[in-house]
Amino acid sequence: MKPFRAQLVLLSFILGNMALGQEKTTTIRLPGKGLKQHDFLYTGEWEYRKAVQTIYVIRDGKVKWSYDIPFKNEQGEMEELGDATMRENGNIVFCRKTGASEVSPDKKIIWNVEAEKGTEIHAVQAIGKDWIMYVINGGPTAKGKIVDVVSGKSIKEFTLPTGKPKAHLQFRRVRILGSGNVLAAHLDSNVVAEYDANGKTVWSFTCRSPWSATRLTNGNTLISSYHNTIYEVDKNGKVVWELNQSDVPEIRLFIAQGVERLPNGNTVIANWCGADVKNAKDWPGTVQLLEVTPDKKLVWALSQWNEPDLGPASSFQLLDKKMLDKIPAYK
């Protein structure tokens, strides 16, 4: 049976028995249409089962496009696919821990930056047609840069306070808002903060090790917090919606990384299993992406570990079919 053949597919997945510290395999029916549920961009970090890590574009239930980077670079350093977004022209801006790049639909690298020794790049954002923002983790402060990839000019630089000097867990998602302010998920400092052009904190919310933060169209902020909690927080710091393991007992949640709110109010979450499921042989069967309604009903759970094997889920972007139709590589 093809992996996305039926809306409800019989799969095995791992349920953690917290009381006994054991794991057992249970067969359940996963809701949704599998790979056909949405068209989406997908990446995942720490895919150490393979010599390469892959960025995927899923269209109409199939892998329409993919791009590989080596698991280790020429210096023998492990690379990690993390933050990634597609521009309207089809170019994909992504980071890989040891640097960040922009790749075109014909798989040409049109921009690239390497992280200096002792630093890491885990947050990157495509802005408009030609700008990229990226954050360099490392040291007592992290450095953000906005560059024009066409002219090569530096547009702006800014600094972000950090909780620890080690680069790896300082930031995984940072975003430039429409106002020009910076929204930063301080993974090592247990806070999400918005900074104005002068670096002044104008909004903040305290939560455990936030991975990502997105400003919604209603002005609220959608946050993924360690270990597997999603918060929607209003401008006054009040939690107006929350999701955690108790809300979706039918599947096991791991570390929530990327999160996106749909126009219909549903929320899609990247459910990264790499740290919690120690043996990679046990990854297949776990849920990588899930979608819940505002009343927390599970309407989609993707467990795609074979034909294609998407690997662990870190970052995704739901894609518009009309936009994809304009790009030959994705039609």
Image: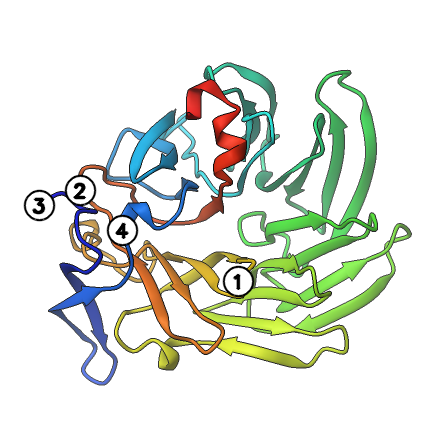
Residue 280 location in percent, x, y? 21, 50
Name the image quarter holding the N terminus: top left
Q: Are circles 4 and 1 on residues that touch, CB within 8 Å?
A: no
Q: Quadrant of residue 194?
A: bottom right
Q: Earlier in the sequence, mark 1 or mark 2?
A: 1
Q: Which mark is residue 306?
A: 2
Tag 4 residue: 34
The kind of residue on which mark 1 rests is Asn
Q: Are circles 1 and 3 on residues that touch, CB within 8 Å?
A: no
The kind of residue on which mark 3 rests is Met
The front one of 178 and 173 is 178
Disc 1 residue crowd, few under 14, some 14–19, many 20+, Cα 10 Å: few
Tag 1 residue: 264
Disc 3 residue crowd, few under 14, some 14–19, many 20+, Cα 10 Å: few
The kind of residue on which mark 4 rests is Gly
Q: Earlier in the sequence, mark 2 or mark 3?
A: 3
Q: Secondary structure at mark 4?
A: helix
Residue 236 location in percent, x, y? 77, 78
